[in-house]
Image (tube, rainbow, N blue to C red):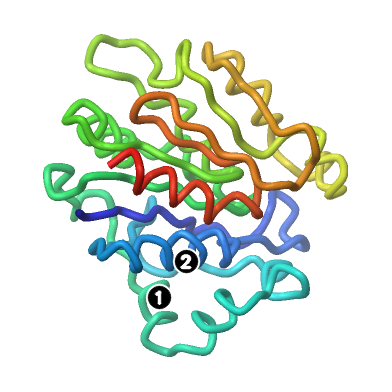
């Protein structure tokens, strides 16, 4: 099995004094699960090249054993310095695409036609399209060959507006991702307790709600495959 992990190229919010980037553990927790399952993994980003890290993801309690191990491994960090771009990817080579998170993805995931094309082909070939946390912003504008939204009528979860408020970034983010997902026809749902792990599968669409859901989401992807 081959998994395509998607990371961001964005380093700050609209306000350049507020840094953001890839939330490291959302990649590493899933990577660990996929690695244990024996899957081959590739990292892609909307523009290719460097993926900056979200500073808050390198602090307690988010900077856990998995994230530290990656951050301290020069070979792994090199993977984030030289990610592939969508035009270097053949969707036929992959069984799943997994959109990682961090607020940065709200800016560059939705507008990437390359990522949309890859996701559509993987999904229509019977593969899995998946996301965790803000990664579901990458699902917003994916349309299928028949013109319908991928998420239309599907059960989907992702970072809740309530969680944006609790994280005190509701004034910084460019839009309300939960509302945008509902506007695309998705059947949005969330766990009862904010920031607790919550992941769901609707056929070959697998989504996780928040940073604590990356491992559960990855396990669901493995099960679905």
Can you tell which quarter of the image residue 165 is in?
A: top right
Q: At x 56% / y 39%, what residue is drawn?
A: 199
126 sits left or right of 85 in the view:
left
Q: Could you say whether the residue bearing mark 1 is in a helix, strand or loop?
A: helix
Q: Which residue is the extreme one toward the front?
A: 223
Going by the image, does 188 lie left or right of 79?
A: right
Report the side of 120 relative to 78 (left or right).
left
Q: Would you call the spot at circle 1 few (<14 residues within 10 Å), some (14-19), or many (20 or more)?
A: few
Rendered view: 77 above or below 185? below
Regarding mark 2 in the picture, which secondary structure is present there? loop
Q: Which residue is mark 2?
A: 51
Q: Quadrant of residue 31?
A: bottom left
Which residue is nearer to you in this view: 91 or 141? Answer: 91
Q: Disc 1 designates what residue?
A: 81
Query: From the viewer's perspective, is residue 103 above or below residue 186?
Result: below
Q: CA gap, disc 1 to disc 2?
A: 6 Å
Instruction: Please name the residue shown 20% across and 32% down the image.
Output: 121
Q: Are marks 1 and 2 in contact (CB under 8 Å)?
A: yes
Local crowd at mark 2 within 10 Å, few (<14), some, or many (≥20)?
many
**Residue 218 at x, y percent in the picture:** 44, 51
Q: How many numbered dots are placed on residues in this image?
A: 2
Relative side of 106 to 146, left or right: right
- Does 202 sit above or below residue 107? above
């Amino acid at each position: 099995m081959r998994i395509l992990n998607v990371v961001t190229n964005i380093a700050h919010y609209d306000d350049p004094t507020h840094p953001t980037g890839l939330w490291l553990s959302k990649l590493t927790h899933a990577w660990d699960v996929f690695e244990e399952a024996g899957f081959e993994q590739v990292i892609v980003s909307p523009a290719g090249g460097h993926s900056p890290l979200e500073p808050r993801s390198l602090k307690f309690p988010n900077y856990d054993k998995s994230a530290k191990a990656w951050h301290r491994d020069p070979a792994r960090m090199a993977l984030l310095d030289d990610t592939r771009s969508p035009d270097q990817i053949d969707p036929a080579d992959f069984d799943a695409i997994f959109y990682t998170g961090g607020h940065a993805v709200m800016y560059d995931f939705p507008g990437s036609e390359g990522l949309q094309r890859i996701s559509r082909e993987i999904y229509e070939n019977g593969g899995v399209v998946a996301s965790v946390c803000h990664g579901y912003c990458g699902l917003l504008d994916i349309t299928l060959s028949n013109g319908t939204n991928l998420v239309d009528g599907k059960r989907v979860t992702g970072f809740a507006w309530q969680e944006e408020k609790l994280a005190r970034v509701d004034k910084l983010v460019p839009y309300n991702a939960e509302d945008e997902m509902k506007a695309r026809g998705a059947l949005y749902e969330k766990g009862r307790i904010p920031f607790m792990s919550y992941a769901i599968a609707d056929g070959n669409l697998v989504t996780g709600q928040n940073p604590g859901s990356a491992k559960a989401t990855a396990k669901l992807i493995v099960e679905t495959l």
